[in-house]
Amino acid sequence: MSNIGAIKPASVAVGQDIIFDALHTMRTHLQMEIAYLSEFVGDKLVFRALDAPGLEHIAQVGGTRDLSETYCNHILAGDLPELMSDTHDIPFAAAMPITKALPIRAHVSVPIERSDGSIYGMFCCLSPNPNSSLNQRDLGLMRTFARLAQSEVQRTLEVKAEAEATAALIETALGTRNFEMVYQPIFDLASGRISGMEALCRFKTDPYRAPNLWFDDAARVGKAELLEICVIETALAALGDIPPDLYLTLNASPETVATGRLAPILAQHPADRLVIEVTEHMQVGDWAALDRSLRALRDMGIRVAIDDAGAGYSGLQQMVRLKPEIIKLDRSLVDHIDEDRARRSLCAAMVHYATETGAALVAEGIERQEEVEVLRDLGVDRGQGYLLAKPMPLRELLETHHGAQKT
Ligand code: C2E
Ligand code: MG
Ligand code: MG
């Protein structure tokens, strides 16, 4: 079903279900053997959806026929009617080779239009047997079901067009390097000194769009790996300018980690200074591949952090499974922790878990001094947040924070 999408699987699947239901309902109502939705692509008819039990050898989804051998263009031109009870009664149809070859006797077919009025293809039912009971009411019903399919086709084409535009935008941003990296310091809460920094991406668009939206879009249109790896390579290029006592953490989705492509890229850099932050709230599709890739990274000496811990509903299970060396507590748990007993208990539980598993705990999104104090008292190792330092260009970060004491 190449042109009915494949870019946004969930919604495409819904559309296909509706189209298939429409085809099946019409086919069984008309007591015919084959129902299909076609798309015209150049001089070909492409089967986009099909209901033809037992007759799969005649047509398959994705299969094609030359449009010139089919009835379609003749129906659109008015040379053949949309409803034919018996093609043998219609000399034009009877003379066409396909009529005998398939064979086709009863045939009902109506056009499917795109939103701009151009013809997308046909919604069609056919049978090798004549059917004298076919009438205008059947044709009316066929048109109704075809409209249903048409709205699904239009919706899917819009999704596809939108995804293509998004993909093009991402490729342009990458091609023109229309982004830059900023770095947010991570402080040791006990000593107040900077211990590392997180690389965060800024896309230079007007109006500004937060990076997570870009990465979400990229994931939706199958460009996540491309975008994430390009950004990671850019962040890594600055590693030589970062003093050796500081580590650098890089964000990556589980999907990108699971590709196994990070290891060779990171291998060119000092592994003990690198941390990969895996986003906790993303669904993991292929745990085996993720486990393999994480093992390869750890074998190199790279540490793994779980990002936004405590934010997602399945997060704890993921955390147990990922066995992170660093746990980054989500901002939602840190926000006004000094005024909220529940947050404090959760944070204490995380401190306990981190201690038991030998992980370091980093609190994200610290905005108030009271939060720093509670977090430090609870035993949280490190902190990151606007109160301590905002994300900034590397040079500014090093001038302002390296060697200085913060908390
Ligand atoms: P994240 O990895 O959890 O990054 C932390 C986010 O919290 C950053 O937002 C940071 O600017 C923001 N932040 C830090 N301190 C505070 C604070 O005190 N208060 C508040 N309200 N926010 C704070 P940012 O840079 O907009 O990034 C948002 C998300 O986008 C990131 O969340 C990460 O998931 C994604 N992202 C950003 N850069 C990259 C990147 O280079 N690669 C990938 N894969 N994802 C990235
Ligand atoms: Mg992060
Ligand atoms: Mg985070």
Image: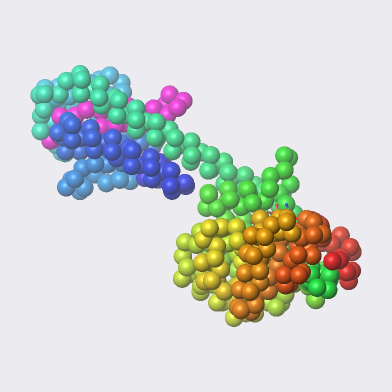
Judge whether 68 appears above or below 177 on screen: above
Q: Which residue is at a point 86% across and 60% down the rendered structure image? A: 396
Q: Which residue is at a point 80% across and 73% down the rendered structure image? A: 190
Tell me, what colour scheme is on the image? Answer: rainbow
Q: Is residue 235 magenta?
A: no
Say which quarter of the image contains residue 370: bottom right
Q: Whole-percent x and y of residue 254?
A: 55, 63
Q: Whole-percent x and y of residue 392?
A: 81, 57
Per the rendered image, the range of residues in magenta is 106-128
Kindly report the secondary structure that dominates the magenta region of the rendered protein. strand
Q: Which residue is at a point 10% across and 29% down the rendered structure image? A: 130
Mark yes or no: residue 204 visible: yes
From the image, which quarter does the N terminus lie in?
top left
From the image, which quarter does the C terminus lie in?
bottom right
Count the marks: 0
User: Horizontal placement of 357 versus 126: left or right?
Assistant: right
Q: Which of these two is toward me, 95 or 264?
A: 264
Q: Which of these two is toward me, 351 or 248?
A: 351
Judge whether 353 appears above or below 5 on screen: below
Q: Is residue 114 magenta?
A: yes
Say which quarter of the image contains residue 372: bottom right
User: Horizontal placement of 281 versus 332: left or right?
Assistant: left
